[in-house]
Image: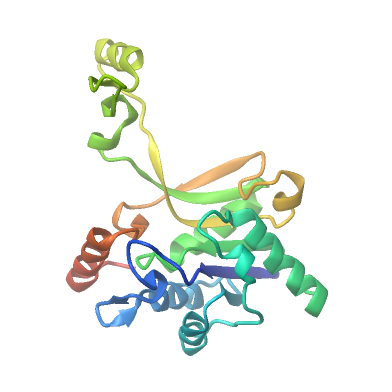
Amino acid sequence: MDKRILGLVTARGGSERIPKKSIALLAGHPMMAYVLDAMKRARSVNRIIVDTDDEEMAAVGRENGGEIPYLRPKELAQDSTGHVPVLKHALEFLKEKEGYWPDAVVLVQPTSPLVVPRHIDDTVALLFESGVDSVETVFKAPTVFHPYNLRVIDEKGFTRFLMPEERAQAAKAGKRPPVYVIGTVYAFRPDNLWKYGTIQGEKSKSVIIDRASGIDVDEPLDLAIAEAILVKGLDK
């Protein structure tokens, strides 16, 4: 593909549930190393940058094939910092310092160690084939997490369904609409960040992936699940 495709891995140093989460060991290797390996094996990505505020994570990034052209400013590495300002900073830095502007950005979190190279390539291909603003991977939500099965607890402590009317209608019809959970890969046009103020933009499509590939490590249980899958083996 004769286009500039930037692979970006955002790895903030601070984390609450798992210290240094992005480089926590997973089957003997830093978690981020799996993501960088998938990026390197994806045919569509021709540049890989690790965006981090942390020197230790930067070192792991370099050791595993990622560029570290800058360290993220501390003000953009807070718990409350969203992705848009972080991505804007990265792209503005590259444009100002190098005159580099990608045709598309592929964002993968360092907490997505089971990301599959072909899923990266599929999102990039669909982005340009369809002409949409962004493409993201998704997997079908397990039945237990379907919105019609979710409950809320009110201020009096009573439990009720989140969407009781829709649940009842689906029961009468004998089926419920499938819903999807965001996966591991976001491929988007960089102008979205300024034009729409979002990664997704106005028109977005999805590549449906398997549930295992879409795992995101947020807490110790997720880390254990990801390691079990890696040890058992996953077809990538």
Q: In the picture provided, is 73 more to the left or to the right than 115?
A: right
Residue drawn at the location 29% of the way across and 67% of the way down: 235
Report the quarter where the C terminus lies: bottom left
Residue drawn at the location 37% of the way across and 62% of the way down: 16
Colour convention: rainbow
Q: As rendered, which of 150 and 235 lies closer to the eye? A: 150
Whether residue 179 can be seen here: yes
Residue drawn at the location 57% of the way across and 63% of the way down: 106
Residue 17 spot, x, y in % from top left: 33, 61
Report the quarter where the N terminus lies: bottom right
Residue 205 spot, x, y in % from top left: 55, 43
The number of discs equals 0
Residue 122 spot, x, y in % from top left: 51, 58
Whether residue 1 can be seen here: no
Residue drawn at the location 35% of the way across and 71% of the way down: 19
Q: In the picture provided, is 80 more to the left or to the right than 199?
A: left
Q: Height in image: 21 above or below 149?
A: below
Residue that extends furthest to the front in the rendered view of this protein:
156
Q: As rendered, which of 230 and 73 lies closer to the eye? A: 73
Q: Height in image: 73 above or below 128?
A: below
Q: Height in image: 15 above or below 196?
A: below
Residue 220 spot, x, y in % from top left: 25, 63
Snapshot quadrant of residue 71? bottom right
Q: As rendered, which of 129 and 168 lies closer to the eye? A: 168
Snapshot quadrant of residue 23? bottom left
